[in-house]
Image (cartoon, rainbow, N blue to C red):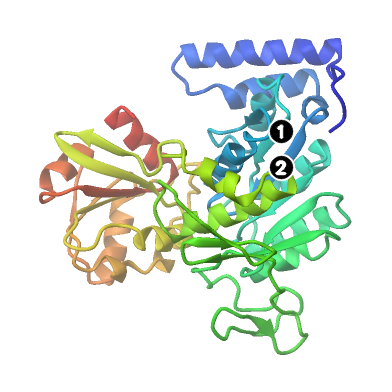
């Protein structure tokens, strides 16, 4: 940590004040949290503001295609055992949103920051992190994001020689390739359910061999590193071989994996696994994800899934048939306007579930479900879908802006 002197120049203080005022005005006008517009204004007034705000913090950066918001929340909860934390808990994960979040944490010791994959290298330069957590890379927002191998290459170049301790998932070859340029890596066996973006070697382009949980390239020798932390069933194994039970209120294997990575990060800051994992139990929902809400006298569980890897993990945690399912897909700017990713999702996993389809791109999804031989009904909106769903708790799965639409409709 860089010491307790005030890092903010008069110009920076004016920028922070102006950003907060604009954010407040945006909230008052009902245009969301205001964090992004507030951060943009602040950075216009002081382009070095993010670096100044991070100067007195021990910073953790968290980046991935899936799970970064939840993992950021789990790490923040764990580190509160050691001191005050500031975090972009609402998921505004580009420089403007990150700047806004840090501007509100003047008393914090730690900064736990979720970072969009494309911005990781730049944010790392500005914030001089003590630790960087890399969870996974897979296809997402095909019209905006780079191809996954290019993202891995950008991470690799941006993190080359980094002083930060990198906590990386050794089960994702793209993450391993990216992290391998760093001199100080802690490998975590967090698992990888979705493998379709990592069948060719990121080092030489050869075909990856994937026997069981292992992987290696038969042509150049690039292979899975030996982990020092691991997810094993309902436990985290630490570097000493001790097994620590995971008790989460968040469902699913993916969240146990997030907890394992979070425990490894917390240990970098001196928080022992038992303390870290106990604190993670406090997290019941993350920005509305996993919340069970009452709507039209029915229980709805809200689940976010925004790309093929996320949908695959989500299908694994929903209640079994005949639990009704509502699927909602949009293709707005924040989602990516290309819906071709729907064809990469294995919707046969929903066989036996009564399905209702809503959202801006409900017809795209309907065609995909038709090809997958699923029984479904296309509905105009959430209200109609709930009315047409048979009794029982309803699992509602939506991509990003569709999820926000649903939260507004149910008053969450």
Give percent across and percent down for residue 183.
86, 60
Pick whichever, 108 or 362, lies toward us.
108
Assess disc 2: are there few (<14), some (14-19) or many (≥20) residues with their C-alpha within 10 Å of its C-alpha: many
Pick whichever, 21 or 286, lies toward us.
286
| Contact check, label 2 and label 1, Cβ < 8 Å | yes
The numbered mark, 2 or 1, whose residue comes first in the sequence reads: 2
Pick whichever, 42 or 277, lies toward us.
277
Report helix, strand or loop for mark 2. strand
Assess disc 1: are there few (<14), some (14-19) or many (≥20) residues with their C-alpha within 10 Å of its C-alpha: many
Tell me what residue is drawn at x 54 percent, y 83 percent. 212
Whether residue 143 is visible here, answered yes or no, is: yes
Which quadrant of the structure image shows residue 292?
Answer: top left
Image quadrant containing the N terminus = top right
Tell me what residue is drawn at x 28 percent, y 54 percent. 363
Pick whichever, 243 or 319, lies toward us.
243
Report helix, strand or loop for mark 1. strand
Q: Mark 1 points at which residue?
A: 110
Image quadrant containing the C terminus = top left
Give percent across and percent down for residue 392.
14, 49
Q: Residue 60 carries which label?
A: 2
Which quadrant of the structure image shows residue 126?
Answer: top right
Give percent across and percent down for residue 284.
41, 39
- Spot the residue most to the bottom: 218
Whether residue 94 is visible here, answered yes or no, is: no
Q: Residue 252 carries which label?
A: none
């Amino acid at each position: 940590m860089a010491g307790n002197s005030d890092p903010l120049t008069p110009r920076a203080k004016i920028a922070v004040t102006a950003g907060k005022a604009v954010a407040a005005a945006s909230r008052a006008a009902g245009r969301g949290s205001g964090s992004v517009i507030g951060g943009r204004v602040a950075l216009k007034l002081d382009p070095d503001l993010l670096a100044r705000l991070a100067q007195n913090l021990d910073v953790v950066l968290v980046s991935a295609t899936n799970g970064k918001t939840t993992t950021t929340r789990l790490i923040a909860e764990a580190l509160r055992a050691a001191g005050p934390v500031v975090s972009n808990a609402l998921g505004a994960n580009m420089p403007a949103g990150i700047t806004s979040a840090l501007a509100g944490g003047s008393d914090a010791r730690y900064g736990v920051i979720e970072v969009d994959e494309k911005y990781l290298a730049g944010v790392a330069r500005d914030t001089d992190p003590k630790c960087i957590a890399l969870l996974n890379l897979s296809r997402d927002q095909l019209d905006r994001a780079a191809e996954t191998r290019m993202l891995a290459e950008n991470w690799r170049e941006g993190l080359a020689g980094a002083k930060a301790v990198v906590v990386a998932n050794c089960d994702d070859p793209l993450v391993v390739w990216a992290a391998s340029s760093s001199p100080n890596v802690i490998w975590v066996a967090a698992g990888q359910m979705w493998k379709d973006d990592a069948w060719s070697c990121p080092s030489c382009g050869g075909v990856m061999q994937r026997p069981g949980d292992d992987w290696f390239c038969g042509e150049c020798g690039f292979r899975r590193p030996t982990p020092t932390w691991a997810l094993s069933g309902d436990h985290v194994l630490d570097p000493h071989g001790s097994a620590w039970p995971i008790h989460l209120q968040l469902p699913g294997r993916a969240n146990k994996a997030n907890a394992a990575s979070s425990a490894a990060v917390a240990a970098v800051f001196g928080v022992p696994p038992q303390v870290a994992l106990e604190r993670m139990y406090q997290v019941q929902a993350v920005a509305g994800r996993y919340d069970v809400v009452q709507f039209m006298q029915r229980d709805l569980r809200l689940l976010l899934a925004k790309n093929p890897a996320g949908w695959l993990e989500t299908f694994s945690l929903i209640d079994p048939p005949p639990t009704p399912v509502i699927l909602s897909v949009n293709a707005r700017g924040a989602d990516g306007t290309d819906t071709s990713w729907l064809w990469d999702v294995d919707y046969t996993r929903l066989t036996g579930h009564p399905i209702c389809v809503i959202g801006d791109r409900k017809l795209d999804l309907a065609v995909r479900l038709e090809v997958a031989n699923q029984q479904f009904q296309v509905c105009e909106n959430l209200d109609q879908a709930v009315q047409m769903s048979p009794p029982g708790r309803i699992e509602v799965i939506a991509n990003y802006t569709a999820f926000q639409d649903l939260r507004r409709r149910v008053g969450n």
